[in-house]
Amino acid sequence: MGERVHSRTTVRGVFLNRITETVTALAIPVAEKLGLKIWDVEFVKEGGERYLRVYIDKASGVGIDDCESFSRAFDKVLDDADPIDESYIFEVSSAGLERRLYRPSDFEAYVGSPITLKTFSPKNGKKEFLGNLKAYADGDVTVEVDGEELLFTKKEVASVRLRVEF
């Protein structure tokens, strides 16, 4: 998947976060009617193409039928609202088992869960940490790694994903 687009990046003067916010607002009622939740929306450029990706979730897990149902229902809403003034590829996907955590509520819901945390710069000689999410406060993340609690500030954290252990 592509990197999340930061709000300072623009496309023809339109802030990309406004595009994702608009698409999210349009998608939520459609998802709710289908018993789904919007996990995330991203608008990214990959290989010269723009992609609008909507990630959906539900308690019992998302299947291909859920993605198809949402895609069909949301496609008309998206066409009618026309929030993006350039061509793009629309994709719907499950948030996935190893989903990225973004919002404070995501972190709160998964305290105690195994995660992979990546940093922008090395810390203790590493940029990737496998451990259990211990706490989250104002963007700072505490991870238990090999019995030791490590605090990562908001400025240090590049990404946090759930990690599936087999």
Image (cartoon, helix red, strand yellow):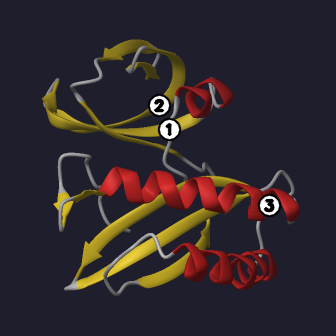
Estimate the spatial distance between the alpha carbons at disc 1 and disc 2, rounded to whole Å: 6 Å
Expressed as whole percent of the image width and height from the top left, the position of residue 56 reads 67, 61
Which residue matches tag 3?
61
Residue under the image location 38 percent in, 52 percent down: 18
Q: Is residue 4 visible?
A: no
| Amino acid at circle 1 | Ile
Q: Nearer the viewer, mark 3 or mark 1?
A: 3
Q: Is residue 83 visible?
A: yes
Expressed as whole percent of the image width and height from the top left, the position of residue 67 reads 71, 77
Whether the residues at callouts 3 and 1 have beta carbons within 8 Å, the answer is no
Res 131 label: 2
Estimate the spatial distance between the alpha carbons at disc 3 and disc 1, rounded to whole Å: 19 Å
> Is residue 5 rendered to the left or right of residue 67?
left
Residue under the image location 39 percent in, 73 percent down: 84
Looking at marks 3 and 1 on the same chain, the residue that comes earlier in the sequence is marked by: 3
> Is residue 125 rendered to the left or right of residue 147?
left
Q: Label 3: how many residues lie within 10 Å, few (<14), some (14-19) or many (20+)? A: few
From the viewer's perspective, is residue 133 above or below residue 29? above
Q: Label 1: how many residues lie within 10 Å, few (<14), some (14-19) or many (20+)? A: many
Quadrant holding the N terminus: bottom left
Expressed as whole percent of the image width and height from the top left, the position of residue 75 reads 64, 82
Which residue matches tag 1?
115
Q: Nearer the viewer, residue 97 or 19?
A: 19
From the viewer's perspective, is residue 123 above or below residue 3? above
Dot 2: what SS? strand
From the viewer's perspective, is residue 100 above or below residue 129? below
Residue under the image location 66 percent in, 55 percent down: 38
Looking at marks 2 and 3 on the same chain, the residue that comes earlier in the sequence is marked by: 3
